[in-house]
Structure formats: C-alpha cells, structure tokens
Amino acid sequence: METADSRNKLHSRLRLWEFPDQYIIEPADGSGASCLEVSRVDASMKLIDHVPESNSVRVPKIRSIFGVVGMLKLLAGSYLVVVTESERVGSFLGHPIFKITTLKVLPCDHSLQNSPEEQKKMETEFSKLLSVAEKTTGLYFSYEVNLTLSSQRLHDLGDESKSLPLWRQAEPRFLWNNYMLEVLIDNKLDQFLLPVIQGNILCYHFETAIGRDIVDITLIARRCTRRNGTRMWRRGADLDGYVANFVETEQIVQMNGYSSSFVQVRGSIPFMWEQVVDLTYKPKFEIVQPEEATRIAERHFLDLRKKYGSVLAVDLVNKHGGEGRLSEKYATVMQHITGDDIRYLHFDFHQICGHIHFERLSILYEQIEGFLEKNGYFLLNEKGEKMKEQLGVVRSNCIDCLDRTNVTQSMIGRKMLELQLKRIGVFGAEETISSHLNFDEHYKILWANHGDEISIQYSGTPALKGDFVRYGHRTAHGVLKDGWSSLRRYYLNNFADGTKQDAIDLLQGHYIVAVSRDMAPVPQKGGLEAVANFPVALFVVLMSFWFATMSLKQAGSDYKHKHLFFSLLWTGICVGMAALVRANGRIFCNRPRLHKPRG
C-alpha cells in the first residue's frame, strides 16, 4: 500500500515546549521542519523556524508528545489536545498502529483574565468536561496509513488520493477528531494533523500454526461519530438516518502473501426512538415522530447501499413486549424499502437461543448463508492483485447492538473465515476452525475482547454473553458476571453517562459552546443537592436492598406478609432517595442554551 507523499508525511516524533505565553511543538524526527507555535493568549497558530530562546523569566517545561489531536474552543478560552503517551499494538497492511493511552488538554485561556465573572464561572464548568474527555478509551492512530478505510476501500483508492495527506483521505464518519482538526486544517498544518479513530484494533497478532501455514488475523472496529454517545443517551437514528452505536467491523486474514478481509456492520434500529432515563431498570421504549420513520430508514439504507453494496439487515430483538413494538415498526418500515439489494430478516434471538443455547444460531446462518456466499469477501493474492471483492454487507442489530449482536457477528465472522481459508487452500472441504484447538481458542478470545471493547465504550461495561464467545458455551461465572455488569450499567445510565454524553458532544462538535445574551448564572447547589453524589446514591441503593433481603430472610411463614411490606417499603425508600441524590450533571440538558447544534 502506497503512503502519502513525503511532503505530507506526518511528524512521528514531537517535542512540546510549554512557555508561559506559548506552546511550541518541535518536530524531533530529524527532518529539520518548521515548528508550530500556539499562543496561550488567543490560541493563534503559525509556523516558526526554530524554538525561541529560554531565559530566567521564560523557563519552559519540555516533554515528548506523539501527535496533535486538535483544538477546542469554549466560551472564552481554547484548548489544545495532544497525545502524551501511546503504545504500538500491531500493524495494518504492514504499517504500524498505535493506541493512545494518555491524552492531555492544554489550556490557551489567558484571555479569560479580562472576561466577565459569570463567563469565567461558565468556562470553568464547561472545561470540567475536558477532564472527562481525557479519559476517552479506544483511540488509535497511524502515521503512515489511513485507518478509517477498510482494506478493500484502501486498495481501490486512486494514486492521486493516495498522495494526499492522511486526513484528506479519511472517511469523515470514522474520523474521531474530525471537528477538533478544523482549526489546524484552516491553518494548513498538514504535517501536524493526526487522524484518530475510536473503536478497537486487536493487533497483538497471534500467529497460529495450521499444519505448515501461519495465519495472522486482525479485528478492526471503527465507531461512527455522527451519532456517537452512551447507551441510554443515544438511541435510534436522527433525521439524516445516522444511527447510534454504528460500528464497522473488519476481519483481516493474512497468510503466505495472501490478504483477505470481511466487513460487517452494526447499528441501532434506524428510526427515531428513545429510552428516557428515569431510574427504572429498563426505561420504556418510545417511538418519536413515527411518521418520519420510513424516510429516515430509507436515508440510512441508501447510505449503506452506496458504501457497501447489497445489505442484509438482521434484526435480533424480541418479538414481544417493548422490544416487540420496535421490531414491529422496523418490519413495517422495511416493507417499503426492501428489494433486490436490501433485505430484512427478523431472528428472535432470545426466543430461539434462550440464555444458554447460542449454538442455535446455526438456524440463522442457514437463512443468510446464500447472501454471504453471493456477496463474498475481499481477497488479494501474493502480487497484490485483486482476486475477489466483497459486494454486500450484513447489518446486525439488537437493542444496544452489543451483546446479542456480538455473539451473532462472531458466528458470521467464524463462518466467513472458514470460507476464506478453504479458498486459499489451507482448509479442506470439511475442515473447520474447531478442528484446531489452539486456533479455535485464540479466535474466540479475539472476538470476546472485541465485543468487550465496543461495549465498554458504549455502555461502560464488558459485553454480556461474552463467556459464550470466549469459551463456546455459557458458564456459571459468566452468568454472575453478566448480572454484575447489568447492575453497573443501571448505575452508569442514571448517575454518570449524562456527563459523559456532554463531553462526547463537546469533543465531536455536536454542540458548539457560544455566549448567549440571556446567559443564566451558574445555579448554586444547596441542601441535599449540595451533598448529592454518585457514591451516596449507590450506597443508598445497596443498603436499601440489603435491608430488604435481610427482612425476607428472617421472616417466618407467619410473618411473611409483614416482612414483605417492609421489604417493599425499603425498596420505595431506595428509589426515592436515589431520585433525590441523582446527579447526572448534564450541562447541555439542564441549563439554558449556551450552545448551538453544529451545522
């Protein structure tokens, strides 16, 4: 794969000089290229020939950094975001890939000194979100290759496109820092523009011997930024057809000079629906603007058709209850959309597979096998010549597009990998991955880790049902772990994800902070609200349930009704107190509009 023209090549080693009035980013790769100066007063940028001299008044702090992620502007100050720690995790088509382990937000906020007091308070409140942003997980980059495109799309790029800077080659929907790069793009700083994706790249590259052959497998997940967010706070689709938790997963196989990839996607049910967080364990599903559902789904599938070819939508949600209402609406909408290139298939995962019989997914595979064989996978021979291309994609969804979806995608990935290995000549006609115990074990772990990473980014916990993906069957430990993860999801949904959602919206430009003439002062907390916090809420919940449990355990048969009454009383106290101390802290929801939707 050709790299970008040397004139556009990213600086892979940088040195940051922190002066009192400016940041200087110096290329440390021996190129002798210009340095980037960023003012800490007004965040202006320019290239300079060398680092300014230091003196007793201007003593700089010096550190190594690994890339410039971008710039954010709040009410008065601006903030430079850089990579201070990273680690190599493998390679993509022969090019090194790095995972960001530490982000640092550097303030350029001296202009705040002359700002009104209320504006300073608001700036402080908004800037707190940046500390949440520094903890963003699953960020990856490469200095040499475009990670936002699949192997097939990279191969099909023309020579002219391959010579462009990496950020210009990038697919915007998978470019995590697309919004933050805008200021650097405006200043034509191509060599400092580091494209970053969020998702998962499992490139520890285990090599598994199968006879005389070595098979190298990589999984890459690319999260779409168009409707990015947390589990309960981002559901369904927007009016443009962009869906929550849309992830493109590419499985790459390399062996004996051959390279083959298979892509599948996941995403929320593609019309407007939501679950309003209200302290219940499973908030009620609400379909929003149902009259727009068909038009929104049409936009979504038209976009998929344009990017991936034929589409098979596999719906894994329940047929009954609240999920059933969504599934019924989805099926009705798809009646107006399906055709030769777009198909819809409902598979009631819980009804057919229950909670332990996931091997029954073979029933689903029998229904989609023809589509998979017809639309195939991408394959290059030893000379880099295209022998086969993928002509369509399977789009899977459940409610969260995490647990049932990951089990299903791992099954599809396994079946396709077996087809690829047979095509290359490694496997015989009846041979399967299960025939090779070591290979089978590593492959299951790969997909289990893949599902966990996506789930952590969306829900805050590892994927449920991960023990089946990891071991091929359900385990007692796995069931208990799922129960604990479910409780953690409940806690995060109600007490933490609101603030996290604000941070995501701020980073990705979904909300742009702007000064409003009717800007309200920061409300002062008092009374119970002043001491309300997440640990208090969790403590109340756990203690209340503990007392309820003890009450029932100690009850004899003659006092069951009495103790049941007190158990219900404790549960009521639990919910009531949790409601009082609930502290989602959503700036963008609970405050008068200090921001405007982007574009």
Image: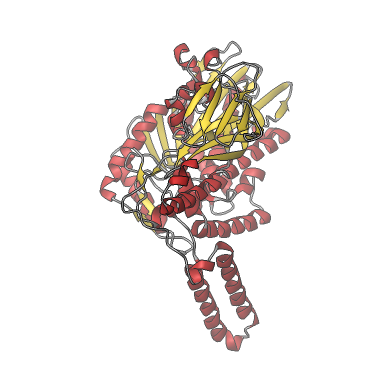
Q: Nearer the viewer, residue 352 or 45?
A: 45
Quarter of the image with the C terminus is: top left
Q: Nearer the viewer, residue 217 or 315?
A: 217
At x 67% / y 56%, what residue is drawn? 476
At x 48% / y 28%, what residue is drawn? 45
Residue found at the very far left of the displayed protein = 291
The image position of residue 547, as x and y in percent, is 61, 77
Q: Nearer the viewer, residue 81 or 261?
A: 81
Asked if residue 301 shows in the view, the reply is yes
Circle count: 0
The image position of residue 26, as x and y in percent, is 60, 25
Q: Is residue 140 left or right of residue 276?
A: right
Q: Nearer the viewer, residue 128 or 399?
A: 128
Compared to residue 558, the image places residue 127 above or below, namely: above
Q: Is residue 565 left or right of residue 84?
A: left
Q: How is the image coloured?
A: secondary structure
Asked if residue 309 shows in the view, the reply is no
The image position of residue 453, as x and y in percent, is 59, 42
Residue found at the very far front of the displayed protein = 56
Quarter of the image with the N terminus is: top right
The image position of residue 8, as x and y in percent, is 52, 17
